[in-house]
Image: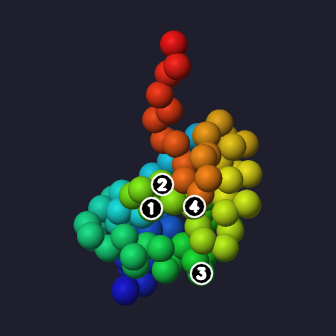
Amino acid sequence: MTDAFAKRVYDVVRNLAPGELVTYGDVAAQAGRPGAARAVGRLMAGSDGLPWWRTVTASGRLVPGLEDEHRSKLEAEGFTVQGTRVVVQPTSSG
């Protein structure tokens, strides 16, 4: 992993607005390394001061071990979380 890639990842995540949710794969692609989702996850694990909660796995899974905090932060931004997964596009019941 290069410092340049890490900087691009941090820039992508730093610029996520409240209510915006992306996958680690989305971040990797935007940072110029499609397919490097795991590298993004490793960088997020060591990040400080970034809105890490706005990133999830492709299946919407919350960060293992931080599920309660992750859920709380996402729900504060209007997302629905069911179990350990965020519901990105909830279905209407009407």
**Which element type, helix, strand or loop, lies under badge 2?**
loop
Question: What is the three-letter code of the residue carrying label 1?
Answer: Thr
Q: Quadrant of residue 69?
A: bottom right
Question: Which residue in the structure is indicated by mark 1?
Answer: 57
Q: 2 above or below 65?
A: below
Query: What residue is at 72 percent from the left and 42 percent from the top?
Result: 76
Cα gap from disc 3 to disc 1, whole angstroms: 17 Å
Q: Nearer the viewer, mark 3 or mark 2?
A: 2
**What amino acid type should be assigned to the residue bearing mark 4?**
Leu
Return the residue at label 2. Answer: 60
Q: Which residue is mark 3?
A: 46
Number of numbered discs overlaid on the protein picture: 4
Which amino acid, by three-letter code, is at mark 2?
Answer: Gly
Residue located 50% across and 68% down the image = 10
Mark 3–mark 1 CB contact (< 8 Å)? no
**Picture quadrant of residue 63:** bottom right
State whether residue 81 is above or below residue 53. above
Q: Residue at x 62, y 53 (%)?
A: 83
Instruction: Using the image, determine if residue 67 lies above or below residue 48.
Output: above
Mark 4 to mark 1 CA distance (whole Å)? 7 Å
> Circle 4 sits on which residue?
62
